[in-house]
Amino acid sequence: MATTKVKKIAVLTGGGDCPGLNAVIRAVSKTAMHDYGIEVWGIEDGYNGLITRRARKFDNLAVSGILTVGGSILGCSNKDNPFAQPMKVNGEIQYKNVSVECVQYMRDMEWDAMICIGGDGTMNISNKFMGMGVNIVGVPKTIDNDLAATDYTFGFNTAVATATEAIDKLHSTAMSHHRVMIVEMMGRYAGWLALEAGIAGGGDVILLPEIPFDIQYVADYCLDRSHKGKRFSIVVVSEGAKPKGGEMVVARTVPESPDPIRLGGIGHKIAHELEQITGLSCRATVLGHLQRGGSPTAYDRILSTRFGHAAARLVAEGRFGRMVSLRGHDVVDVPIEDAIAKLKLVPPDHPLIAAGRSIGTCFGDRAC
Ligand code: F6P
């Protein structure tokens, strides 16, 4: 067994759930316990468990049999922020900084370090805790793949696979009914999910937040296909897509959340407008949280295992303030600050967009 000064750590799954979380928990815990003899604790429900002092000690059995299981055995919460924790006072929400109490809890538990698995919100909070002297290593998670400083986050591949399967299924019903099927995907302000699933599923139109669209170009393209005998079209739209000169569609605001804007509704809006312009029969499908659920793909199981293993090693070696990251085929580590500087958006000159345009995919920004 390798030697380390680290005796006891805690692991936390921040933000929304994502396929592969359990695979990371398993790899972190097994590596830490087997290779270094480190005691591992799991914090319940993300930062909520830190605030409400809820954690449980893991043994080998607790993290066995979870590789293929979706979600997080620890539970998730995307409403909690120790630096601005929403609390109801006289029926009104007020925000309280409870970070000092959280650090005291970590000290009481004698954790030498925390491994925080999450997206930009989780890394932001981790960074603030680091400023208070807490030892943290980050693991990048999100189906949106919008986290900077890593080529891929785990969970994204599974979400792409789920969305691609949905597009495949929509194809057969679209063909039978000669319809335009609009399929709305998650992804927040980044179009990675719609782009990759759209290309993998052979979407005829792909609309991304990074490329504002003109509905007339989309309508013309669907009509043109129809006139040429392709009597159906599949329009893949990212929840953050917006018309030229227009705004994203907000489904609702969640004031108590660190990320209060919930996008959604663009799919139905486009279906309505396309039907009005073209006279074609249009239907919208919103994939929603289906994209976050289910068993991780083989790719995500492997990436999660590599990330978890690397994170445990960083902790054991005392290399704190780092986030594991995928660069090409290699797992490396980067400063956590690099991950929170800005969101990783799809560059409009991305090779997959160029390939899409060459094979006749319409991105809605010009006549196709
Ligand atoms: O960030 C992951 C994500 O699934 C986004 O794609 C989506 O916009 C958002 O979370 C949905 O959040 P909630 O689970 O709060 O509805």
Image: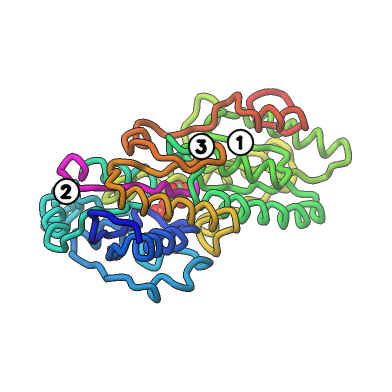
CB under 8 Å between callouts 3 and 1? no
The residue located at (88%, 41%) in the rendering is 229
CB under 8 Å between callouts 1 and 2? no
Q: CA distance from mark 3 to mark 1?
A: 27 Å
Residue range highlighted in magenta: 129-143
Kindly indicate the quadrant of the structure image that contains residue 172: bottom right
Amino acid type for the residue under numbered disc 2? Tyr
- Residue 290 location, x and y as percent? 54, 59
**Tag 2 residue:** 95
Local packing at callout 1 (Cα closer than 10 Å; few below 14, some 14-19, many 20+) is many
**Tag 3 residue:** 327
Rendered position, 208 above or below 183: above
**Tag 1 residue:** 207
- Residue 353 location, x and y as percent? 65, 30
Image side of residue 14 versus residue 367, left or right: left
First along the sequence among labels 3 and 1: 1
- Residue 342 location, x and y as percent? 38, 31
Between 57 and 314, the one nearer to me in the picture: 314
Does any atom of ligand 1 lie closer than 8 Å to the CB of label 2? no
Amino acid type for the residue under numbered disc 3? Arg
Image quadrant holding the C terminus, namely top right
* Secondary structure found at label 3: strand
First along the sequence among labels 2 and 3: 2
